[in-house]
Amino acid sequence: MSTIENITEQFRQLQSKNGSSQLTPLEQNAFNAFNKLGIPTVKNEEWKYTRISSVFNKNYQFTPGNIVTSFSAAELDAFRLPGYENANELVFVNGIYSSSLSIIRSSALVVMPLEIASQNEYKEIVLTHLGHSSKYAKDGIHALNTAFVQEGVFVYAKKAKTVEHPVYVYNITDARSANILSQPRSLVYVDEAAQVQIIETYDTIGLSESFTNQVTEIIVAKDAIVEYYKIQADASHTNQVSTTHFRQIGKSVVHAVTISLSGGMIRNNLNIALEAAHSEAHLYGLYFLKGNSHTDNHTIVDNVQPACLSNELYKGLIDDSATAVFNGKIYVQPLAQKTNAFQSNKNILLSDKASVNTKPQLEIFADDVKCSHGCTIGQLDEEGLFYLRSRGINEQTAKSLLVHAFAIDILEHIKPEPIREYIDQLISERLEFNKI
């Protein structure tokens, strides 16, 4: 049985098992879209530089009833982030939320299955906002995740509360006994005047193939502040498509940082819809790639209402035979007068075999705006390298210093100190033990 046939059969079984629910129409529509759109190919402009069809030429286990995992709390210790003792920890194993491994320390945070949230006091939130990301992610991969949305999780940050502990989200793939297709799905609602920090990581245990197809939708209400940090440092035999969708429905602030250090094929879709006047969105990204890693960052900033501010800076370091893609779009809708939107992508190629494709874009339908975009591709600064060598610093150390200086612009936007130091350490270790 092919992977596509297996997906079809598992969808039928899941629908038969779960019966009718508030989420059934959304799932059925998504599955129909998946059948229509299929797996993206390079003929799809949005997937021109990222080949994903080969990922589906494998037999995967991907539904809760079929996946066998013995992942334990003791094993989780190896993947915990610094400062976990004072953090809310949400653990997903093979795409399924594990309440037994998770720890909720903040009274201002509520976590429950999406299916339950669609039936209780959060019903209106779920039915209004769940699936909004499909407006921007119009492909079969996104539709596939939504077709199995009943397995997802609802996270709620209470009104006028600061979630006093950061939220650490661990995505663990247990690929010790079989190839795994995992599909984490989360709907996060940050209520009025709430504040929350979210830090998300990805790790794989085992040597079998894995593919993570993730969708996270974050709704940000009036006067709320959200900090979101994504750290990708997984094994080279793993593949991932991660869609993070912000919807700012009230005047609010979003601060998002994406760090991609290792993995096989990585595709990051980051969408931000500024639907309330005077909202702010700050997007930062760093990809430091080696080996045969491939990282594709697609960002969309949609200015729907007037007087919004967005600032986007992505920087890339590409070594060995690694490849990188950056595709950033800024939309300014007709009502979005007084928009300030800025976008920049800077890349350094560290080897002759490394490559990058970058495409910043603006689509402006208003006339009173300030928008700019740009990109650069180059090599390490020869003058800076010569200066350091002339001061008695050996070549490898000099290159490491220049690389670190290039990356620091992004690292300084990581506000939680333990996380910033952790990522800085990962980069420093690579610079120390891997010749540039």
Image: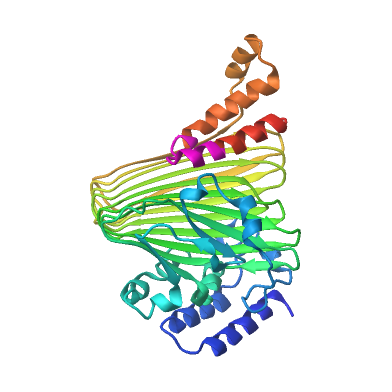
In this rendering, does residue 50 appear at all?
no
**Count of numbered marks:** 0
Q: Is residue 135 above or below residue 229?
A: below
The residue nearer to you, when weighing 268 against 107, is: 107
Taking the image as shown, residue 366 lies to the left or right of residue 136, namely left
- Whether 104 is among the magenta residues is no
Q: Is residue 419 magenta?
A: yes
Judging depth in this view, the residue of 422 and 260 nearest the camera is 422
Q: Position of residue 58 (x, y in %)?
A: 74, 69
| Residue found at x 62% / y 53% | 77
- Of the pair 196 and 87, the residue shown nearer to us: 87
Q: Quadrant of residue 265?
A: bottom right
Is residue 167 in view? yes
Split into 4 quadrants, where in the image is the C terminus? top right
Magenta stretch? 411-423
- Residue 257 point in image, percent of width and height: 46, 45
Q: In this orientation, which residue lies closer to the viewer: 133 or 78? A: 78
- Residue at 72% x, 30% y is 435
Residue at position x 53%, y 50% in the image: 297
